[in-house]
């Protein structure tokens, strides 16, 4: 089976969107840091950032079963 080639930008978009979705819907507590007023900021907590990176590794491994990152194609 020949694998589809995905450009680097789309590769990053795909794995980050999937990993973010998994993290958000699997977390019981908030994944975002809060400011002094208690408002969520679009910055992950340190713990959730580590979880995100672990999820990214798994998502990329799954993606590599059917896709190839263009930057890794031998010319």
Image (cartoon, rainbow, N blue to C red):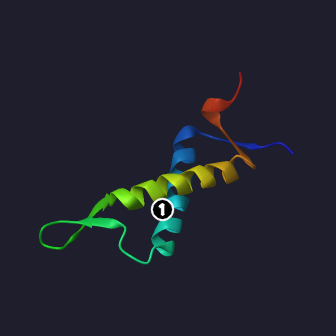
Give the labeled residue for mark 1. Answer: 20
Q: Position of residue 33 (x, y in %)?
A: 27, 64
Q: Residue furthest right?
A: 1
Give the x, y percent position of residue 66. 75, 49
Residue drawn at x 17%, y 66% as measured from the top left: 35
Q: Residue reaching furthest bottom? A: 28
Secondary structure state at the residue bearing disc 1: helix
Residue drawn at (12%, 67%), measured in percent from left and top?
Answer: 36
Q: How many marks?
A: 1
In the image, is residue 45 above or below residue 5? below
Position in image of residue 39 (x %, y %)? 20, 72
Question: Which of the pair 56/2 is nearer the observer?
Answer: 56
For the N terminus, the quadrant is top right
Residue 41: x and y in percent read: 25, 64
- Name the residue at 83% across, 42% down: 2
- Indicate the quadrant where residue 18 lies: bottom right
Residue at figure coordinates x 67%, y 49% from the top left = 61
* Within-10-Å neighbours for mark 1: few <14, some 14–19, many 20+: some
Query: In the displayed image of the protein, which residue is found farthest to the front?
Result: 47
Whether residue 44 sits left or right of residue 20 in the image: it is: left
For residue 3, which quarter of the picture? Answer: top right
């Amino acid at each position: 089976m020949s694998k589809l080639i995905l450009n680097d930008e789309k590769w990053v978009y795909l794995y980050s969107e999937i990993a973010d979705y998994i993290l958000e819907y699997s977390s019981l507590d908030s994944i975002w840091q809060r400011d002094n007023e208690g408002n969520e900021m679009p910055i992950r907590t340190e713990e959730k950032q580590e979880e995100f990176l672990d999820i990214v590794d798994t998502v990329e491994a799954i993606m590599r079963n059917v896709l190839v990152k263009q930057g890794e194609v031998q010319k």
